[in-house]
Image (cartoon, grey):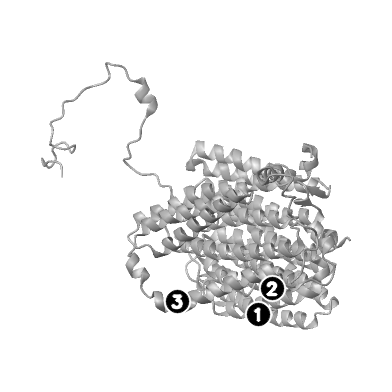
């Protein structure tokens, strides 16, 4: 084996991110917390460069002796994850300074988490899956607890850590069973060795692997940590959690099930159908009682993961393409909604209750209309982008013969429309309370861009759907 | 051959006896020390079957880190071990069930079950051709080079996390200033005569050393 056999060129974005984070760590340590803004903007720049590196390289193949794969699917998911992470870092700047958590490690940990996401998305082996996932999760546990002097934040970090460690254990146990019953951890070898019928031991392994991954995407019945962690973590960190890692974990989930276990659709399809239906129903029902908007967004994200998993449950190329479309739209909606939540500050204090939005349409109409757009979109009302996301996953499900799942999905979507539209009612028809503080310019920019994308996204629907179809087709080449 | 057999029985007997003493000892510090003895004997057993890498890892990781950590915890925390010991009889059935399950698993493995077989080939390298330290080194820095690097990044994040979550800037901490110390000349050093028995508080209370 020689050095060129490693095919390092395929991993350029990840290598760049790793080196950038090490360099920025040294810069951060020598400049101290006062220059957090510099480190943060440099991290954003590093992510933007990584996006360009990802987008500009159209070579596909295996690197690092088959442990790492670069293909169209990975590129699509990486661009979304890195983009979401970059926006989350930008959104965290103002908040970090006001809430006394401006430490240069914050953007760096988010950068390292993004690196972990890149490695997860490109994993082509059970071991590289695990190390990528662990790199990402470990960084996330720390950023959840970054406001270490508040009880809520430390509680969120601890809960996330303990439950995350449990799920990692399940994932590893599943991986070890799969390795034991097949003799390989490599996805390519597994894909060619596993055709159709499999032994009981292997299926138990796949179930444990699915349980571990379902935890990472916060799908029912492994969702318990989500509301507490989303509520307790600082708001820009919650925005980060809800967007970037979710995309990476869903992409990983898809690659694992469709790649090495692609011929065993019959075995894992029922599991995915169950967790997706359960997530949709719980996301719709449990969110109704929430008063805290961050908890509401947590349940909403559980529901949204359920809808995305409908695409995976169909197990077809259309399904995966729909899943990618759905996740892309979900990320934009989530970031936009969290930008509004971040703007909810009164006299310098952050407020998080839904009641605090009362009468927003009169005090800050722009903010109210933006949130209304995101809520209509989440509820799945045309012509907003969220409608098309749901349309594609449900269409794929019906084509795959999963009519019941699709019908339950539509019903859950109707139920969830209740709480999304209730927020709009509070903003437009309730008596106004005090108005919010001036919104930071970076947040206004994020809001404007996301609102425009969600409203006018349908104009670019057909090229975008072609893109997701291309990305999904990679996984189904025999 | 006979030497190996004798060595096996000696190490195995000491391992079993010291393992029993770990559980049966009244003093937790002795328990941990017996645990270390068990680890050493098990390491010797590993050497006997040719698993020298595992033996070294057991000594380095378990004795060097884990057992010493145990020792620290036992010595630093005020845990009433007599209280912990109560209810032994009450929990005996549960312990017995766990023991039976473990024994059953061992028997299953030895007899071999019909759960399925490896379909993609055997992962173990031929043990008579290459020593296992060499085999591990061979793949760790070539085939699994990527994982080795990422594991390094994971450890970096763990270290950063520990610092972010626990490090605090304290006021009034006197740090050693090496540059200033090296820079001193004879003239800048001042000798002060300190009265004995009056403490370092400079006579604020006038009291002696507590």
Look at mark 2 in the image and give the residue it sits on: A306
Are the residues tagged 1 and 2 within 8 Å (C-beta)? yes
Q: Nearer the viewer, residue A412 or B70?
A: B70
Instruction: State which quarter of the image contains the C terminus of chain B.
Output: top left
Q: Residue at x 67, y 67 (%)?
A: B110
Describe the element under mark 1 as helix, strand or loop. Answer: helix
Q: Residue at x 83, y 50 (%)?
A: A60
The subunit carrying tag 1 is A
Look at mark 1 in the image and give the residue it sits on: A281
Q: Nearer the viewer, residue B59 or A172?
A: B59
**Left or right: A341 in relation to A115:** left
- Image position of A272 with respect to A450: above or below: below
- Image position of B154 with respect to A159: above or below: above
Of the numbered discs in the image, which one, if any, rests on residue B92? 3
The subunit carrying tag 2 is A
Q: Position of residue A170 (x, y in %)?
A: 62, 66
Q: Position of residue B185 (x, y in %)?
A: 31, 17
The subunit carrying tag 3 is B
- Marks 3 and 1, how far apart in space? 44 Å
Task: Say yes or no: labels 1 and 2 on the same chain.
Answer: yes
* Quarter of the view holding residue B111: bottom right
**Left or right: B171 in relation to B9:** left
């Amino acid at each position: 084996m020689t050095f060129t056999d490693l095919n390092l060129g395929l991993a350029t974005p990840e290598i760049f991110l790793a080196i950038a984070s090490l360099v920025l760590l040294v810069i951060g340590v020598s400049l101290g917390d006062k220059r957090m803004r510099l480190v943060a903007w440099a991290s954003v720049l590093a992510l933007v460069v990584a996006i360009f590196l990802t987008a500009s390289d159209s070579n596909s193949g295996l690197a690092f002796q088959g442990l790492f794969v670069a293909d169209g699917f990975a590129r699509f998911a990486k661009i979304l994850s890195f983009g979401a992470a970059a926006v989350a870092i930008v959104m965290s700047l103002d908040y970090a300074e006001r809430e006394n958590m401006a430490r240069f490690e914050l953007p760096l940990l988010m950068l390292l988490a993004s690196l972990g996401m890149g490695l997860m998305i490109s994993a082509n082996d059970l071991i590289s899956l695990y190390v990528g996932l662990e790199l990402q999760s470990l960084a996330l546990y720390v950023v959840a607890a970054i406001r270490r002097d508040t009880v809520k934040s430390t509680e969120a970090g601890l809960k996330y850590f303990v439950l995350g460690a449990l799920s990692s254990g399940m994932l590893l146990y599943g991986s070890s069973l799969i390795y034991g019953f097949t003799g390989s951890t490599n996805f390519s070898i597994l894909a060619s060795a596993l055709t159709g019928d499999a032994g009981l031991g292997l299926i138990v392994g796949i179930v444990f692997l699915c349980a571990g991954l379902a935890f990472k995407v916060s799908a029912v019945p492994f969702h318990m940590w989500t509301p507490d962690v989303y509520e307790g973590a600082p708001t820009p960190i919650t925005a980060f959690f809800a967007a970037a890692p979710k995309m990476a974990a869903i992409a990983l989930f898809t690659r694992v099930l469709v790649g090495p276990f692609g011929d065993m659709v019959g075995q894992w399809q029922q599991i995915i159908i169950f967790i997706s239906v359960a997530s949709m129903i719980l996301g719709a029902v449990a969110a109704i009682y929430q008063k805290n908007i961050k908890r509401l967004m947590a349940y909403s994200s559980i529901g949204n993961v359920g809808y995305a998993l409908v695409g995976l449950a169909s197990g077809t190329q259309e399904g995966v393409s729909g899943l990618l479309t759905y996740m892309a739209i979900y990320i934009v909606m989530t970031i936009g909604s969290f930008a509004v939540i971040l703007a909810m500050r009164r006299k310098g204090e952050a407020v998080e209750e839904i009641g605090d939005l009362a009468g927003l349409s009169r005090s800050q109409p722009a903010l109210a209309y933006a949130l209304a757009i995101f809520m209509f979109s989440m509820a799945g009302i045309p012509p907003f982008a969220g409608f098309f996301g749901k349309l594609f996953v449900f269409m794929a499900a019906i084509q795959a013969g999963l009519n019941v799942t699709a019908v339950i999905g539509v019903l859950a979507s109707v139920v969830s429309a209740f709480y999304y539209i209730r927020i709009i009612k509070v903003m437009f028809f309730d008596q106004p309370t005090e108005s919010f503080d001036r919104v930071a310019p970076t947040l206004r920019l994020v809001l404007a861009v996301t609102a425009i994308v969600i409203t006018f996204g349908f104009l670019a629907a057909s090229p975008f759907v072609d893109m997701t179809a291309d990305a999904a087709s990679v996984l189904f080449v025999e | 051959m006979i030497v190996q057999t004798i060595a096996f029985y000696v190490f195995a007997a000491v391992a079993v006896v010291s393992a029993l003493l770990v559980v049966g000892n009244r003093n937790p510090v002795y328990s941990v020390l017996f645990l270390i003895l068990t680890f050493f004997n098990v390491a010797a057993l590993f050497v006997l079957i040719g698993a020298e890498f595992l033996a070294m890892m057991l000594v380095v990781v378990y004795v060097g880190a884990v057992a010493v950590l145990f020792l620290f915890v036992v010595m630093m925390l005020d845990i009433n071990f007599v209280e912990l010991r109560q209810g032994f009889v009450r929990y005996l059935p549960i312990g017995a069930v766990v023991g039976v399950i473990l024994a059953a698993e061992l028997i299953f493995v030895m007899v071999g079950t019909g759960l399925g077989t490896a379909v993609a080939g055997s992962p173990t390298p031929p043990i008579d051709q290459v020593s296992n330290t060499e085999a591990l080194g061979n793949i760790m820095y070539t085939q699994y080079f990527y994982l080795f690097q990422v594991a390094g990044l994971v450890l970096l994040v763990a270290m950063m996390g520990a610092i972010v979550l626990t490090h605090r800037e304290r006021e009034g901490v006197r740090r050693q200033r090496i540059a200033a110390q090296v820079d001193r000349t004879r003239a800048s050093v001042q000798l002060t005569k300190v009265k004995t028995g009056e403490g370092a508080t400079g006579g604020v209370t006038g009291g002696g050393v507590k």
